Amino acid sequence: MSFVSKTIIEADHELRYLNGAELEILRAYLNSSEKRIKVIKTLRDREKEIISKASRKLFQIHPDYIGPGGNASGSRQRALCLRDYGWYLRLITYSIIAGDKNPVERIGLLGVRDMYNSLGVPLIGMVDSIQCLKDAALAELKSEEEVKLAEPYFDFVIQNMAQ
């Protein structure tokens, strides 16, 4: 659910109009829409470069992952790892446009710990991988303002995987 929808539903649940503070928050959110779209376009258009940088950094931190018997040792396993990078990056863009963590939480985090555990993927590696993805993605953004729009959603994923 988007930030806008959530605000409207809360007011309607209380059978009231949006108050002044809510309207100001909505104004600020709507005024940031062009910046949000710019961030999303940058992340989308630079996806391959972001994933390449992030995976290189991850495999420097955890070289055993690409070594014999590692979770990303073969071309198939490595492709799956890179696919997950793209998947998380895309989910984060959904949250950026919504202005809410709900898209990444509902689609990308519910049950993820169990899934990775069942596949034998170390969760610390997933935390490190999203941190690498965050670093690579934020490096592509042009301003501190753009970084502030994207960073909380990367941090949310990292924190949830680290629990």
Image: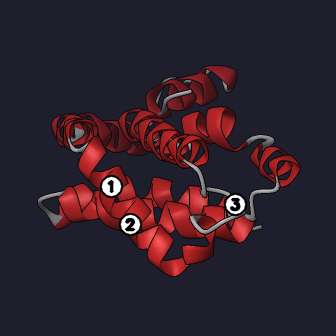
- Check disc 1 and report the residue beneath it: 52
Relative to 118, residue 17 above or below: above
Left or right side of 46 for 159 = right
Q: Badge 3: few (under 14), some or many (20 or more) residues near its Cα, within 10 Å? A: some
Query: What residue lies at 60% left-to-right and 56% top-to-bottom?
Result: 72
Q: Which mark is residue 56?
A: 2
* Residue 28 x %, y %: 27, 44
Callout 1: helix, strand or loop?
helix
Residue type at numbered disc 3: Met
Q: Nearer the viewer, residue 5 or 36?
A: 36
The answer, for residue 109, to whether it is visible in the render is yes
| The C terminus lies in quadrant | bottom right
Left or right side of 136 for 46 = left
Callout 2: helix, strand or loop?
helix
* Residue 45 x %, y %: 20, 37
Q: Badge 2: few (under 14), some or many (20 or more) residues near its Cα, within 10 Å? A: few
- Using the numbered discs, state the Cα–Cα distance from disc 1 to disc 3 in whole angstroms: 22 Å
* Residue 145 x %, y %: 20, 60
- Check disc 3 and report the residue beneath it: 161
Query: What residue lies at 69% left-to-right and 60% top-to-bottom?
Result: 161
| The N terminus lies in quadrant | top right
* Dot placed on the residue nearer the N-terminal end, 1 or 3: 1
Callout 3: helix, strand or loop?
helix
Q: Nearer the viewer, mark 1 or mark 3?
A: 1
- Using the numbered discs, state the Cα–Cα distance from disc 1 to disc 2 in whole angstroms: 6 Å
Relative to 16, residue 40 above or below: below
